[in-house]
């Protein structure tokens, strides 16, 4: 898969993982694991990129004597998910066109 395409898909997956409620790294990986495998180093790189882009915010809290960072999706992050859904419809149309001979049409 094209690395830029995969990068964009992973960004949206992380945003979707925190869409309904704030979350932290380990839980994000756990929530995504039935759908996609991701290392912690990859996740934290993505989280930092999304924070810099203004698609999420971070707050640190003390949890069992350790600092835990919670990630919160912003309005811009929600907009990115919506944009992705609209873009994906176009991608699916292209996919149907490319694979039309495979289906016998």
Image (cartoon, helix red, strand yellow):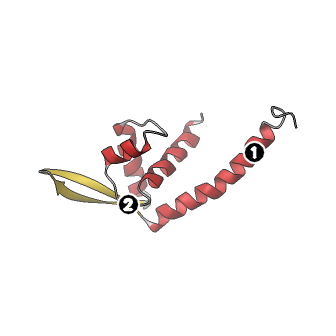
Q: Residue furthest right?
A: 105
Foreground: disc 1 or disc 2: 2
Q: Position of residue 95 (x, y in %)?
A: 73, 41
* Residue 61 image-quadrant placement: bottom left
Whether 77 is drawn above or below 67: the answer is: below
Q: Quadrant of the C terminus?
A: top right
Q: Secondary structure at mark 2?
A: loop
User: Residue 59, image x and y in percent?
Assistant: 27, 60
**Residue 36, percent from left and from top:** 48, 38
Residue at point 38% right, 35% down?
Answer: 39
Q: Quadrant of the N terminus?
A: top right
Q: Is residue 90 left or right of residue 51?
A: right
What's the distance in space between the residues labelled 1 and 2, CA to CA? 33 Å
Give the SS element for disc 1.
helix
Task: State the residue position of label 2.
Answer: 21
- Residue 37 position in % (x across, y down): 44, 35
Residue 104 as seen in the image, left or right of residue 12: right
Residue nearest the viewer, comparing 6 with 31: 31
Residue under the image location 42 percent in, 37 percent down: 38
Residue 26, labelled with which disc? none
Q: Earlier in the sequence, mark 1 or mark 2?
A: 2
Residue, x 50% and y 63% (percent of image)? 78
State the residue position of label 1.
94
């Amino acid at each position: 898969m094209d690395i830029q395409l995969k990068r964009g898909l992973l960004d949206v997956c992380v945003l979707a993982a925190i869409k309904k409620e704030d979350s932290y790294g380990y839980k994000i990986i756990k929530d995504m694991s039935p759908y996609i495998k991701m290392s912690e180093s990859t996740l934290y790189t993505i989280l930092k990129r999304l924070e810099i882009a203004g698609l999420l915010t971070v707050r640190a809290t003390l949890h069992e004597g350790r600092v835990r960072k919670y990630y919160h999706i912003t309005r811009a992050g929600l907009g990115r998910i919506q944009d992705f859904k609209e873009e994906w419809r176009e991608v699916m149309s292209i996919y149907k066109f490319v694979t039309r001979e495979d289906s016998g049409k």
